[in-house]
Amino acid sequence: MKTIEKIGLGLFLIGLAVFTAVPFLGNYTLSEELVLANTKDIHQEKMAEILAPMYGQEYGSNFSFLSAFGENFNTYNDNLKAQQLWDQVIWDDYGFALAKAAASSPVRDNPWLWLGLSIGLAALGGYLYNFRQYSDEPSGIKNNGIFHSKLKNKGWLGMITGGYLILFYILLYWFPAYLVNLVWMVEPVSKLLSGGPASQWFLYGLVYTLAILVMGVRMFRKYRGNKYQQLRTASVMFFQTAFAFLIPEILVLLNQPYFDFKNIWPLDYDFFYDYQISTFLSGGGMGMFMLIWGILLIIVGVPVFTYFYGKRWYCSWVCGCGGLAETVGDPFRQLSDKSLKAWKYERWIIHSVLVLAVVITAVTIANYFSGFSFLGNVTNQLHSFYGFAIGSAFAGVVGTGFYPFMGNRVWCRFGCPLAAYLGIVQRFKSRFRITTNGGQCISCGNCSTYCEMGIDVRAYAQKGQNIVRSSCVGCGVCSAVCPRGVLKLENGPEENRIIDLPIIIGNDSIKLNA
Amino acid sequence: MSARHLVIIGNGISGITLARHVRKMDLDTRITVISGESDYFFSRTALMYVFMGHMKFEHTQPYESWFWEKNRIELKKVWVQKVEFSENVLVFDSGEKMAYDILVIATGSKPNKFGWPGQDLEGVQGLYSKQDLELMEKNTNQGVKRAVIVGGGLIGIEMAEMLAYKKIPVTFLVREKGFWDNVLPKEESELVGRHIREHHIDLQLETELKEILSDSKGRVRAVVTSLGEEISCEFVGLTAGVSPNVDFLRNTELKVNRGVKVDAFFQTNIPDVYAIGDCAEFENPPAADRRTIEQVWYTGRMHGETLAHNLCKRPVPYQPGIWFNSAKFLDIEYQTYGTVPPKWDDSELESFYWEHSSGKVCFRMFMNTAGQILGINNFGFRLRHEFFDQAIREKWSGEKVIAKLDKANFDPEFFAPYYMEIQKAFKEQFGGNFQPAKKSFIQKLFGASV
C-alpha cells in the first residue's frame, strides 16, 4: 500500500471513530420551555406535566436522558393503556425532538468542526484511499485477493462492518433520539440547503450521498478502461447527489413539497398514502406536477424505458438503493448466493413483496376515495406494518447491513417491489439481454461469482445462450470480468432474444435437423 | 438385459460433456465418472483465479453438487492404476476393481518435462491439475524472492500473473524470438511481449533453460540459462507445453503413441474403448489446419458432444467447424477465428494488420490471393463469433468483412469503436467500395476515444 493510501485509510478510520463517538458527547438538560416548543399544541400541556420531574436536571449521557424520558413518558402511557383509554394515549414519539432540543455538547456549539472531524475526515480519507488506486498498473479489472480478504469474504472485518451497519440502521430507524448530536452536526448544512432544521433523515441523506461519491471514485479506479462502468457510476453519483439529495432540499427552500423525482412507486411505497396525496394536492402547480410525474413514471416510464433498455436504466443507472449497492456495495458483490435454492426463495419473496405493496396501495387509494369510510384508520396500521417490515427492516437494515454477509443487492434481489415490477417487464417484453459470444465460454465462473444478483450467468454462457432474466440489473460486471470477452449487454430486436441451441458453434459433426 | 455401464476416466470438460450429453439422450445407460483429482467437475482454466483470490475453488465448479445425483451420473474419486482390457475391468490404486461395458479415456494432459537437470527438485513444478495448484500455493507461500518460468505459452503467462499477484518478481524464459511466436504472428507476439514487460515481468526471449540448481535441502536455488547466466530463484514454473496423460496405459493392448490413438469416431484399437480430449491422438488430423492432438477447452467440449451422439444415436465422424480460440494475456483479451498462421508466404496469403496507437489493440485478417477471408486475430477488443464463423465458412471477401465490421463488434456499449479505424486503415491499404462508419451522436457524446 502506498503512503497516500495509508494516510487515507488512517483519516477514514479517525473520521469513523469520531462519528461513532459523537452521539456520546455532551449532556442533556430539559426545561419546560423546550417541551412546549417541541410538542404539538394538543400535547403541550400534558407533556409539560409528564416531564416535569426532569426539568433542570443535567443528564450526562443520551442513555441516562433517554431512559429518564422513557420512564416518565411510558409510565403515563402505560397507565392509560391499562385503563384502555386509547384516545388519551400519546402516540407521537417526542424522544428525538426533545433530546435534540435538550442536548448541549461541543458538537452543537461547533458543528462545522465536528462535521469536519467525522464525516469530513472519513470522506477525505476515503477519497485519498481511492483516487490513485492501481495508478502504477495498466488498466484492467483486478479482483486480486478478494477471497483472501478479511473484509470481502465474510472474514472478521466483514462481520464487524456488517454489525456496525446494522446497528447504525437500527438506531437510525427506531432510536434516532440517540443520534441527536450527529444531527446537530449537520444542522448548518441543512440550514444552508433548505433553510430548515436537520432531521436524522437529513443526516442519513448526507452520509449516503457522500458514501456514493467517495466509493464512486473507487469504481472509476477499479473499472478503468471500462467505459460502461465509468458512465454508469457517474450516472448513479449524479442522480443521488442531484435528484435524491439536493433537489428535494432546494424544493423545501422554495416552499415546495419535498420530492425525489426519480423515486418510483412501489419502491416509493408512500407515494399514494393519503398524507402524501394531500401534500401534492395542496402543493399548487408544482405539487400537481409531482403527482402526475410520479404516475407517468409508473405507467409509462417504467414499461417504455424497460422495453428499450431493460431494467438497468433504473436499477444500475438511476436508483438510489442501486447507487449505494453499486458503489459502497461493490466490494461485496461476490457474496451473493448463486444456488438454485436461493433463486427459488428469491422469486417467492420478491413477488410477495410486490403483491403486498400493490394490495396496500390499492386499499389505501380505495379508502382515500371513499372518504375513509371504507377502512377508516386501518390503512395507517397497514402502512406502519409495511413501513416497519419492508421499508425499514428489509430495505434498510437487511438491505445495507447485510452487504458483508449476503452481497450488495439483498434488498434489490429479494425485496424491492419496483425491481419485481421492472423485472416482469424485462423478462417478457424487452429488447435487453446479455449476449453470449458463440462458443467462447470456458466455464471459468468469474461472471457468476461477480454477479451481484446471484444469477448463475455461466450456466447460460456455457450453453451459448443469451441471458434473459427478470432479476438482471444490467450492471455489466459479468461482461467486464469475463476473461474471454464472451458476454455483452445488448438492446436488440426481440426475435432471437431467447435462443437454445443444443450444439453451439464450432462443431460440424452433428447436424441438428438431420 | 441390464443397462450398459459407461465408465469415463477423467472429469474434465471432455469427460463431463460426454456424461451430460449421454444422459440427455439416454436415460438407461449407467454412467460413472472417475477422477482422483477432484470430487466435482471444475473449470481447469480458472485455477489461476483461485490462486489470485478472484474466486474460491467452489466457484470454478459449474454444477452444484446435487446435479450429479439428480442426473444419475455416479462420481468416483479414485486414481485408476491400470485397465485390464481383456476383462473389461479397471483396477484402482486402492486395489478395488470396476467393470465397464464402454470405457472412455479422458485423462487430459500433464506438463511437459524435457529431462532438464534438476527438473524434479522441490519448488519446481508445472501447472495443470488441482494438485498442481495446491502445490504452487505451498511452494510460493513464503521465502520466494524470485521465480523463473520456463516456456512461453498460455500457462506460462498465467503463472507469471499468479506470481505477480504474490508480488514475486518473475523472470520468464522463452526459447523463441517472440512470445508464443509459434502461434502468433510477429506483431501480435511483440504486442503481448510489450504488455508482459509493462507488468514488470522480466521477459527474456531466445533463452532456454539449461539446468536447475539445488540447495543443500533438495530445493531449487537457481537456474542456469542457455546464455550461461545463473538466476537465483526459489520457484521454477515449467510451462513448455503439455502432453497426454496416458502413461498408465502404455505397454497394454491399447495403441498409444503420444496420446491414445483414435479414429475420427474416437474409437481406439480396442472395441468399446474410446478416448477424447487432450489425451486422444487422431490417426489423421480432423481438418487441414488442425493438429492430431487438440489441447483446447473448446475442442474437448466438442469431442464430448460428438462421442455422446455416437454412443447414443449413430456414429458420425468428428468434424470441427471453423477454428476458434481465445485467451487473456494479463489484461489483454485475445480471440481468433479461422486460419491464422504465425508465418506465411506473401505469394499465397494477404495479411491486413491494424494496430491502435496505444499498442494494446490490434486486428489482423488473412485473405487468400482472391481476397477471401481465411482468419483473423484480434487483441484488446471483442469480435463476434457467429459473424466470423459465417464469413469464413462462406468465404466472404475481405472487403465485405471489413465493410460489415460494425456488425461483428462485440464490445459493450460506449466502448471505443475501433472498427471505424480498422475500416479506414483497410480502405487506405486495399481500397474497397464501402464507407467507413462514422461516430454516432451517442458515440461522440459518451463513447470512449479510439
Image: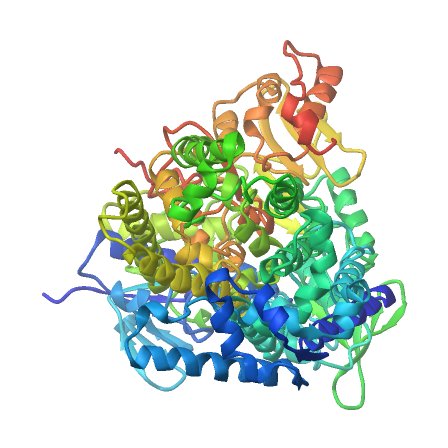
Residue at the left extreme, as displayed: B1
- Residue drawn at point x = 50 percent, y = 44 percent: A263
**Scheme by which the image is coloured:** rainbow
Query: Which residue occupies the foreground of this view, B424 or B346?
Result: B424
Residue B134 visible? The answer is yes
Q: Give the total of numbered labels.
A: 0
- Residue drawn at point x = 63 percent, y = 26 percent: B442
- Residue drawn at point x = 58 percent, y = 50 percent: A323
Image location (x, y in percent) of residue A394? 43, 63
| Residue A452 higher or lower than A3, as above or below | above
| Residue B179 higher or lower than B429, as above or below | below
Residue at the bottom extreme, as displayed: B217
Quadrant position of the N terminus of chain A in the picture: bottom right
Query: Which residue occupies the foreground of this view, A292 or A216?
Result: A292
Image location (x, y in percent) of residue A277? 41, 42
Horizontal relation, residue B86 to residue A99: left or right: left
Q: Quadrant of residue B396?
A: top right
Query: Which residue occupies the foreground of this view, B416 or B244?
Result: B416
Image location (x, y in percent) of residue A251? 61, 40
Horizontal relation, residue B99 to residue A5: left or right: left
| Residue A14 higher or lower than A191, as above or below | below
Q: Quadrant of residue B30?
A: bottom left
Image location (x, y in percent) of residue A198? 65, 58
Query: Which residue occupies the foreground of this view, A30 or B152?
Result: A30
Residue B132 visible? The answer is no
Quadrant position of the C terminus of chain A in the picture: top left
